[in-house]
């Protein structure tokens, strides 16, 4: 079974969006990995409201690049506000990122990742024709 790992930066809305991303990935047939080193699909859900999440993302993306170098089939996805703000240059800044998507495009993430994260539309920035909350998506709640 292919596995995913989602790392969330920033605001409370991002935490909620990450639950939706996890639910979608599980509906695609992926299981959750505790650590990104064990994941076939690594997703970073980002924020631009605060500077610190941007700095933390850069450090995590450096680690993701090392993982991608070891396993070129590993999928690296960057979503959220930072991805949307950097949409014109995210693939230039981070050429190892496979998929990037804004917060209004989460409902389409499955289309860009393909079945089980196998048929990835690499180098694709996902923008939905219309922004939506994606309330109909499955949610995987974190137990606290």
Image (cartoon, grey):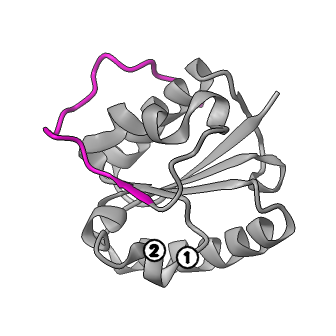
Which disc is residue 144 wearing?
A: none
Taking the magenta stretch, the answer to whether it contains residue 126 is yes
Q: Residue furthest left?
A: 130
Residue 87 position in % (x across, y down): 30, 69
For the magenta stretch, what is the residue range? 124-144
Asked if one can make out residue 142 in the rendered structure from this viewpoint, the answer is no
- Comparing 91 with 133, the one in front is 91
Quarter-wise, where is residue 91 in the image? bottom left
Q: Residue at x 61, y 71 (%)?
A: 96
Residue receiving disc 1? 95
Residue 135 position in % (x across, y down): 27, 21
- Comparing 12 with 86, the one in front is 86
Q: How far apart are the two marked residues, 2 and 1, measured between alpha carbons?
A: 5 Å
Asked if one can make out residue 127 in the rendered structure from this viewpoint, the answer is yes
Residue 99 position in % (x across, y down): 49, 55
* Quadrant of the snapshot with the C terminus: top right
Q: Secondary structure at mark 1?
A: loop
Q: Main secondary structure of the magenta part?
A: loop
Q: Secondary structure at mark 2?
A: helix
Label 1 crowding class (10 Å Cα cut-off): few <14, some 14-19, many 20+? few
Q: Residue at x 81, y 56 (%)?
A: 37
Taking the magenta stretch, the answer to whether it contains residue 138 is yes
Marks 2 and 1 in Cβ contact (< 8 Å): yes
Residue 47 position in % (x across, y down): 35, 63
Q: Is residue 91 left or right of residue 73?
A: left
Q: Is residue 107 left or right of residue 25?
A: left
Residue receiving disc 2? 91
């Amino acid at each position: 079974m292919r596995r995913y790992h989602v790392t969330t930066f920033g605001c409370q809305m991002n935490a909620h969006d990450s639950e939706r991303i996890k639910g979608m990935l599980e509906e695609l047939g992926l299981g959750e990995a505790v650590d990104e080193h064990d994941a076939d699909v690594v997703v970073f859900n980002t924020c631009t409201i605060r500077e610190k999440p941007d700095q933390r993302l850069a450090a995590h993306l450096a680690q993701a690049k090392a993982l991608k170098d070891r396993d070129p089939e590993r999928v690296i996805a960057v979503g959220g506000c930072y991805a949307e703000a950097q949409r014109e240059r995210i693939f230039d800044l981070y050429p190892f990122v496979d998929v990037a998507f804004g917060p209004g495009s989460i409902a389409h993430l499955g289309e860009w990742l393909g079945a089980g994260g196998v048929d990835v539309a690499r180098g694709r920035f996902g923008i939905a024709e219309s922004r939506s909350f994606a309330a109909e998506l499955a949610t995987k709640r974190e137990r606290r």
